[in-house]
Amino acid sequence: MKGFTLLASLAAFLAPAAAHYTFPSLVVGGVTTAPWVNVRKTNNYNTQAPVTDVTSPDFRCYDTQTNPTAETISVAAGSQMGIMSDGTIYHPGVVNVYMAMAPGGNAPSGNVSSFAGDGAAWFKVYQITAQTNGGTSITFPAQNLPGVTFTLPKNLPSGQYLVRMEAIALHAASTFGGAQFYISCGQINVTGGGSGTPGPLVSIPGVYTGNEPGILLNIYYPVPATYTQPGPAVWSG
Ligand SMILES: *[C@@H]1O[C@H](CO)[C@@H](O)[C@H](O)[C@H]1NC(C)=O
Ligand SMILES: *[C@@H]1O[C@H](CO)[C@@H](O)[C@H](O)[C@H]1NC(C)=O
Ligand SMILES: [Cu+2]
């Protein structure tokens, strides 16, 4: 009995770790950075557990318990960058990538290390939505990817930004608070940028209530006829 209990609790401990994921690395110039060097260490670096409260302070960068610092890495505007998980995006769901410039982030004195990401500063640079066809099937192109790759808009102003990965798992999203958010924030220094005005700008938390049709839904039955990606439109420059 004792052995069984130990095994059972071991299994309970290991199972979520095998299934869940964090996003500890960036990909810059084709090179994947070491875990938690250019990404702020998240509270779940050990447990890999998601955030489910979209109004919680942890919904921003999931780092309230780690007091994290990260090194800022330079990325050229117009180039590709990536954000990598420590496994794969195991659950069915969708992805959003948001960015926010640090105050004075385009001045020599700017420093994203001291930017908490507060205020209506965030815009969306990338998303992977769900594919529907009127109610016969729904598919999730982000599912099982090891991470995401996207192009920084050429018009993005140079400066220091947080870049926030948000993978939304929807397998349990049919009750309020059931969607699972896997989140992390990297620190980048955009170089050679342009004079675009990124937007629309939103606050995080604040961008969602949890009642959005793309966050509170049953993906299994009836099969959704359409899917509405949460958050603002992507700013493509
Ligand atoms: C930015 O701030 C961090 C932490 O406060 C510090 O370690 C780093 O040297 C600063 N970077 C620059 C370029 O001033
Ligand atoms: C950001 O890039 C600019 C332009 O290359 C450079 O002068 C500056 O030192 C960089 N800052 C950081 C924190 O990497
Ligand atoms: Cu899960």
Image (cartoon, rainbow, N blue to C red):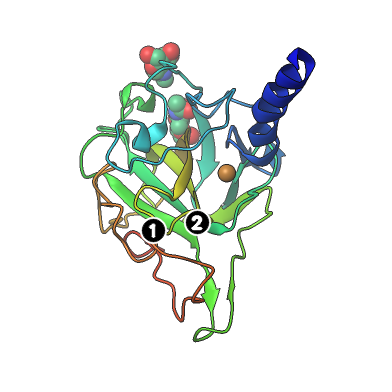
Q: For the residue marked with disc 2, what is the amino acid?
A: Leu
Dot 2: few (<14), some (14–19), or many (≥20) neighbours within 10 Å?
Answer: many
Tell me whether the residue at label 1 lies in contact with that at label 2, contact meaning CB atoms closer than 8 angstroms.
Answer: yes
Quarter location, residue 108: top left
Quarter location, residue 196: bottom left
Q: Which residue is mark 2?
A: 170
Q: Earlier in the sequence, mark 1 or mark 2?
A: 2
What residue is rendered at 49% in x and 37% in y?
A: 50
Q: Is mark 2 within 8 Å of ligand 3?
A: no
Vertical arrangement, residue 68 with respect to residue 187, above or below: above
Q: For the residue marked with disc 1, what is the amino acid?
A: Ile
Is residue 89 visible in the rendered image? The answer is yes
Query: Where the N terminus falls, by quadrant?
Result: top right
Is residue 192 visible in the rendered image? The answer is no
Q: Residue furthest right?
A: 3
Residue 6 is left or right of residue 23, and the answer is right
> In the rendering, at what x and y percent does residue 128 appear?
52, 62
SS category of the residue bearing label 2: loop
Pick the front one: 194 or 169: 169
Q: Which residue is mark 1?
A: 215
Dot 1: few (<14), some (14–19), or many (≥20) neighbours within 10 Å?
Answer: many
> In the rendering, at what x and y percent does residue 48 appear?
57, 31
Number of numbered discs visible in the structure rendering = 2
Residue 28 is left or right of residue 60, and the answer is right
What residue is rendered at 46% in x and 81% in y?
A: 225
Pick the front one: 94 or 101: 94
Q: CA distance from mark 1 to mark 2?
A: 7 Å
Q: Residue furthest front?
A: 1
> In the rendering, at what x and y percent does residue 62 appear?
42, 30
What residue is rendered at 49% in x and 26% in y?
A: 42
